[in-house]
Image: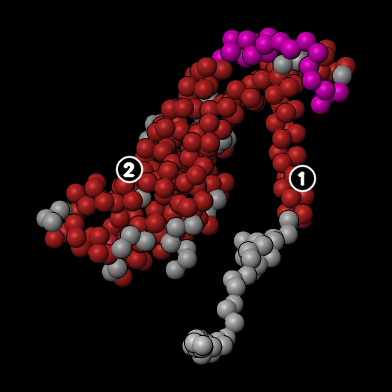
Amino acid sequence: MTVTRTATLPAAPAGPPVARPPRRRGRAGGRRERPNWLAGVLATGWLVLVAVPLYYLVAASFRTRQDYLSTSPLKPPSAPTVENYVTVLQGGFTTYLLNTVIVTVGTVLIVLAVTVPAAYAVARNAGPLVQRMFSLMLIGLAIPAQATIIPVYLLITQLRLYDTLLAIILPTAAFALPVAMLVLTNSLRDVPKELYEAQTLDGAGPLAVLRHLVLPLAKPAITTVSVFTALNAWNGFLFPLVLTQSQSTRVLTLGLWDFQGQFGTNVPGLLAAVTLSVVPIFVLYLIGRRYLLSGLTAGFGK
């Protein structure tokens, strides 16, 4: 009789239990984020406040005078018509639009031609004289245009620029310089010094650095300054009112005032002129809106 013995292996020592990773229930903290109802209500209210006037402006411009006076202002037009727009275009609107475009483009070009190299010099030069001049220029932020209208009028008349588009462009650009300098200088101060030093080691001069380094990196700030200056020039009323007189140099802001007197109680005709004047600057804002926030906040985190 043969006895078979089976070897018994010793049991492995019990180790600590393996912890399982917790299941993710939300994006942060393992909890599902709660909806912010207050923010949603406030955003909806703000959307209504903005959308209702725009709807009223566009819808009323397609009404007849009788339809506007007899029905609710928020009701869609029963018989849409473009007669108001035809009347506006035949009443000198194209001349006012062209003058406004010339004033806006000229103001933006002057502001950029002055502030871009000036902001580059201030950002690269930490000398006390340059910084004091920069601080002195920023005092212009506290001076309203209404307080200087008489000296500006005297200067324009002495230069024999009265009743010209240049009489509107020059003071509008002058009052836009402090804000443009502030935005561009803070933006260029964010550029690392190593990039400037690398350009200098490569043999680039100041103009080459300005062209190949500063302009590409300052594109958001330049767009912000351009849009902000264009908005002020497009909506300017004081300088065109005081410094121009003839109909050939009239801009849209004064033209709308003229349309108000021309149409009398024809509110749809006036709103058609307002709609046509809003469309170009609204398109410009849509193009440059992505750079506005980044350009205005550049350098303020330091």
- Would residue 124 appear left or right of 167 to someone viewing this image? left
**How many dots with numbers?**
2
Evaluate whether residue 187 shows in this view. Answer: yes
In which quarter of the view is residue 135 placed? bottom left
Judge left or right: residue 50 versus residue 156.
right
Vertical comparison of 196 with 152: above or below: below
Q: Dot 2: few (<14), some (14–19), or many (≥20) neighbours within 10 Å? A: few
Q: Residue furthest front?
A: 1
Work out whether residue 125 can be spotted: no
Q: Secondary structure at mark 1?
A: helix
User: Does residue 1 show up magenta in the picture?
Assistant: no
What secondary structure is found at the residue carrying circle 2?
helix
Instruction: Locate the C terminus and report the quarter of the image it occupies.
Output: bottom left
Relative placement, left or right, of 168 versus 210 is right
Magenta region, residue range: 72-92
Q: Which residue is mark 1?
A: 45
Upstream in the sequence, badge 2 or badge 1? 1
> Looking at the picture, how far across and down is residue 160, in whole percent?
39, 31
**Was residue 85 drawn as part of the magenta stretch in this picture?**
yes
Residue at left offset 39%, top offset 53%? 184
- In the picture of the structure, the residue carrying the numbered disc 2 is 113
Q: Kindly identify the residue that appears in the image at 47 percent across and 22 percent down.
A: 98
> Does the CB distance between marks 2 and 1 fall below 8 Å?
no
Within the image, what quadrant is residue 71 found in?
top right
Indicate which disc residue 168 carries: none
Give the Cα distance between marks 2 and 1: 41 Å
- Near-viewer residue (274 or 10): 10
* Residue name at image x 56 percent, y 35 percent: 235
What percent of the width, then of the height, locates residue 4?
50, 86
Q: Amino acid at mark 2?
A: Ala
Residue 276 x/y as whole percent: 60, 22
